[in-house]
Amino acid sequence: MGRRRSFSEADVISIAANTFLRTGYGGTSIDDLVEATGIHRGSLYKAFGSKRGLFILALEQGLEGSESGFGARALDLALVALLELAPRDAEVRDRVAAFITTLADDPDRILGLRLLSRAGIAIHPPGIKKGQESNERPSDR
Amino acid sequence: MGRRRSFSEADVISIAANTFLRTGYGGTSIDDLVEATGIHRGSLYKAFGSKRGLFILALEQGLEGSESGFGARALDLALVALLELAPRDAEVRDRVAAFITTLADDPDRILGLRLLSRAGIAIHPPGIKKGQESNERPSDR
DNA sequence: TATATAGTTGACTGATCGTTCTTGAAAAGC
DNA sequence: GCTTTTCAAGAACGATCAGTCAACTATATA
């Protein structure tokens, strides 16, 4: 009972995931999420509890559906989680570890390839050459 | 002429590199570097210009000496640079790209393996199992 | 229709961010 | 011994950080 939520949780989680995978966990502020989703800070906190809580939901949503498998979306979320959270957060580590096992028999290779591709670096020997997107500008922060 | 520097630049850069590769670029504050090095904020800025400037020197120092090759130190710095800076910073991207080419013929695999190891995740099929260090605690930030 | 419950909103918190400035101390060249 | 130059040190800058709170609004139940 009471007032109904004005947004779809799944939609907001999806948008949050897009933001996290692009700009990283530490690189994404609550204000960034407010702007991206159009949802008020207070409502985000009411619905998701904390930045970490929202990230974990985003991670969950991005990693499930193992059908996607090698999807850049899931891989990017995993990369962000692995580098920024996993070393110091057991819950995140365990979730990503489970995902890793569903990633063929050479998850290290798949993650490494995506990491380089995401960074705009092409690999030459056997891999197919890949162009880099031009997202420039140093930026302080 | 003038007063002499009270610290070795190389030493400070080395300590900064250790800090960056452990806690990431965004996860490392100037205060963290002040505490780790024992050098005053003003002196760090006088000597290195900016946080990014110091990181680039740390990256340079960590990646050179290709003899080390697969050293965790160089790999961790490369990982941090690739995930946090490289997508939006051409100078960092180019420096890491050059390092990548010196990394045997499967840099993607080497980076991926180190990423998982750094996160405390073991890989099972052919790779040797590796224990995880226990650096716990979620932490806000 | 009244009451209870839950969501929205905007202002606000203290902490921390990267960076700069001013003042004073050390050392090199004259 | 001066002067000039460089560095050290502390305080301070505005901006931004994650998170909170009280007032208001909408809805579901009774």
Image: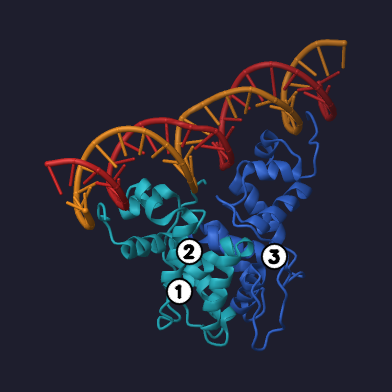
Chain colours: A blue, B cyan, C orange, D red
Q: Which residue is mark 1?
A: B63
Say if B96 sits above or below B88 in the image: below
Measuring from the top left, give residue D22's x and y in whole percent: 62, 18
* Residue type, mark 3 in image: Ala
The verdict on a common chain for dots 1 and 2 is: yes
Image quadrant in which you'd find residue B112: bottom right
The verdict on a common chain for dots 3 and 1 is: no
Task: Label 3, secondary structure: give it.
Answer: helix
- Cα separation, mark 3 vs mark 2, equals 29 Å
* Residue type, mark 2 in image: Ile
Residue B112 in view of the camera? no
- Cα separation, mark 3 vs mark 1, equals 29 Å
- Please tell me how crowded label 3 is: few (under 14), some (14-19), or many (20+) other residues with Cα within 10 Å: many
Letter of the chain that mark 2 sits on in the rendering: B
Task: Label 2, secondary structure: give it.
Answer: helix
Residue A102 in view of the camera? yes
Q: Which of the two marks, 1 or 2, is nearer to us in this view?
A: 2
Q: Is C23 or B54 nearer to us in this picture?
A: C23
Measuring from the top left, give residue B74's x and y in whole percent: 45, 73
- Please tell me how crowded label 1 is: few (under 14), some (14-19), or many (20+) other residues with Cα within 10 Å: many
- Residue at 47 percent across and 79 percent down: it is B129
Q: Which residue is mark 3?
A: A74
- Cα separation, mark 1 vs mark 2, equals 10 Å
Q: Which of the two marks, 3 or 1, is nearer to us in this view?
A: 1
Image quadrant in which you'd find residue A112: bottom right
- Residue at 74 percent across and 51 percent down: it is A15
On residue B56, the disc is 2
Task: Label 1, secondary structure: give it.
Answer: helix
Measuring from the top left, give residue A95's x and y in whole percent: 60, 62
Location of the N terminus of chain B by quadrant is: bottom left
